Image (cartoon, coloured by chain):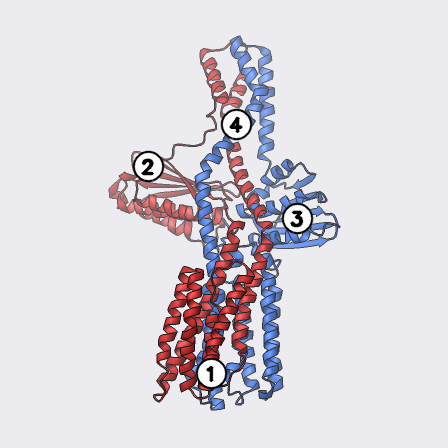
Chain colours: A red, B blue
Amino acid sequence: MALGLPAHLRTTTFGTAYVRAAHTIAAVCLAAAIVVVATRQASDDGIVIWPALFALAALAALLWNADRYGTVAAGVLYLLAGLPLVYAVAWFAMTWIPGIHAGDAFLLTMLRVALGLVAVPAFHLVPALLWCVAGLLAAEAAITLAALQTGMPLAFDWTGFTLVAAVVALFATMNRLHLALIPAEPRLHRAADQESLAASRTDLEARAAAVLHDTVLGRLASIAASRPGPLSPAEGRGMRRELDALVGDDWLDDTEPQAVLPTGGPLARAVEDARELGLEVGVSGDVAALASLASAAATALAQAVGQCLVNVERHAGVHRADVVVSAAPDALSVLVVDAGRGFRESEVAPDRLGLRHSVRRRIEAVGGSVRVWSAPGRGTSVAIRVPTDQTVST
Amino acid sequence: MNAPTRPIGTLQRLEPLTGAVIRPFTLTVCAVVLVYVLLRILLMAPEVRSPLSVVAAALAIVAATALLAWRASPLRSPIGPGVHAAVLALGLLAMVLAAASSWGANSVLRDDWAPVAIGLLSVAISPYRPPRELVAGAIVVAVFAGFLALLQAEATGTAVTRGVLVVIAATPILALSLGGAAFVGSVTAAVARARTDARRLEREHAAQRRAELAEAVRHERLRILAREVIPFYEEVLSRGELIDADRDRARGIADGIRGVMVAEVGRTWLDVMLAESGRSAVVRDPGRLAGAMSTEQRAALRAVLLVLLDRSGADALSVEVVPAGASVAVELRCTVDPADTALRPELTPFFAVLRFVFADLDVSFTPSLLTLRLRYDRP
């Protein structure tokens, strides 16, 4: 089971997420700048700002490159090439849009933010801040140069500054937070590990108790009820066999021979899907008999087993289930067993259609039957029986 | 098979440990929102026609940040879509009131503070909600902001192109909200990858670990058998006959083994864990209901118990597990050393995890006694 990220992955994960967030904001700002330039150009034939679209597209491509490769070189390229590109956009805007310092200065804010959020995976605050400052300075230099050339007034850009500062504040806070979590993480994983071991141990102890019950306790009860006298050869053999088995090393060997389901078959796919969900699924029994099913019955069986496994994963509170296949002359049975929380079928909420629809109705539709054994705290076994007679199953 | 709990892809749910420390992040962003709004209101004062509206707008933002700060506590139920909608609605209300405060006078719509404030609020809530919901919420609010910008433009008769005004109003909301969603999406994807890797490793090691455990259990059983059963078998086999005394001895050995088995069946993971810790701890669980906890619930409670059992000052630990209607109530009590000020911060991350895996959590922390009350669904 997993209750979160392991400590060693935290720093890189949060650092990478910061970069992704910064680049997303920069991309939205570039998209907004493109829409503003295109809208302006479309609404006024007398101005020529469409070349700025090429510069913005190039900037967007460089941002994509920085995001895709996440290297210092890609970041530096974005800043160095971004400087003349931002200058070009600012120059076209200041030359052709009257009163750019008013409403349309939004365009310049977008450029500042887009360059200010040139983030490369920097897992500490100082490098992240330095990249932001470098980006803001590059944008400011380009815009100032364009303003000086076109004679436009300069003003402090509150919005751009706030946006970039807010994103850096976010990173600074996150950076501190994940460091604070590091001492807690190993303990949580230790607890999860202990829990997993304890569950396995309980299972094995139950198995051991069953072995003892079936062998030693039975024999002792038989001796307690016997009359004094010589041991019969059968009794002697039985006791020797039990002694050898108990002292031997395989009496708790629970590794029942795992069966391999026919590759590509519907049941194999259902089991694989459940494993993808994180469930450990043990398959045993006469899997070769699956070939005797008609395709409709095989599909219904696979879907029903799949639903049972999904139910285990969602509701049983355990991460293991066993699928046991057994064949009779005219039918094939599959037992899906888990050692989870169990339930009373009568108390299953009416909106929980999985067992009723996906399992019972499907199987009944191909002439089969379903039986469920479960009780709270005692796990669940679902026995699905489908006929192998093809005239019934189709 | 009860209490269906489908996982939602929120950072808080996938990374329950962050629940404890994500609140400072939320508080930081809320503080940034308040400072930003205050500064912008002061800067825009000359254009304000209705001071009452601007005060009401500021109060709506204060209410949104207060709601977030209050609900972000790791001890409260997870922030749901209702709180998300309420925060966005308060942001929209602030936007409408702010627009009303300078209706017809604000010719420079890019100075409006509300879109940035809403975007930052969306960032503050991002760890608690799934990325898709964050994006959907942002789009709805951005459309509304664009519409309001068009109405404002008509009122002021500004010369700025209408399309540009819509972009100006919508961009801060979209940029910040999508940034927050991207952050959360990136972390949740990493968590999902880590889980897949962990499960694969677990599967790879499961067989080996189980074999080692089986060996340990077998040795434990052999220890019990070697004491009485094996010598008895060997004695009877070497003698080749049963005598009167064998019958009583067989009965006595069987009773002993049965007693051990009954005692084992009556123990839950909680009994075993506390017994193995060697500390004075009392478990009252007559219905063996601790066994009905899910794997995650057990692991989270184990983590808290591990912290408590590691403290020399944490004594007189007791855990009571009793049925309470349709659920099970757990009460954990532990006396703690009042001088141990590090205990509470150390436990806080685990409280956040408990809050996620149990239906209910109540923590009471007096200087000398910690009381935890939990609830989970009865099987």
Disc 1/disc 4 C-alpha distance (Å): 83 Å
Q: Which mark is residue A184?
A: none
Whether label 3 touches label 4, CB < 8 Å: no
Q: Are marks 2 and 3 in contact (CB under 8 Å)?
A: no
Q: Which residue is mark 3?
A: B331
Residue depth check, mark 1 versus mark 3: number of the one nearer the observer: 1
Q: Position of residue A219 (x, y in %)?
A: 51, 20
The reply to whether discs 4 and 2 touch (Cβ–Cβ < 8 Å) is: no
Q: What's under tag 1, amino acid-wise?
A: Ala
The chain identifier of the residue carrying mark 4 reads B
Q: Dot 3, crowdedness within 10 Å: few (<14), some or many (≥20)?
A: some
Residue B26 or residue B72, whichever sits in front: B26
Amino acid type of the residue that numbered disc 4 sits on in the rendered structure: Arg
The tag on residue A147 is: 1
Which of the 4 quarters of the picture holds residue A279? Answer: top left
Dot 2: few (<14), some (14–19), or many (≥20) neighbours within 10 Å?
some
Earlier-in-chain disc, 2 versus 1: 1
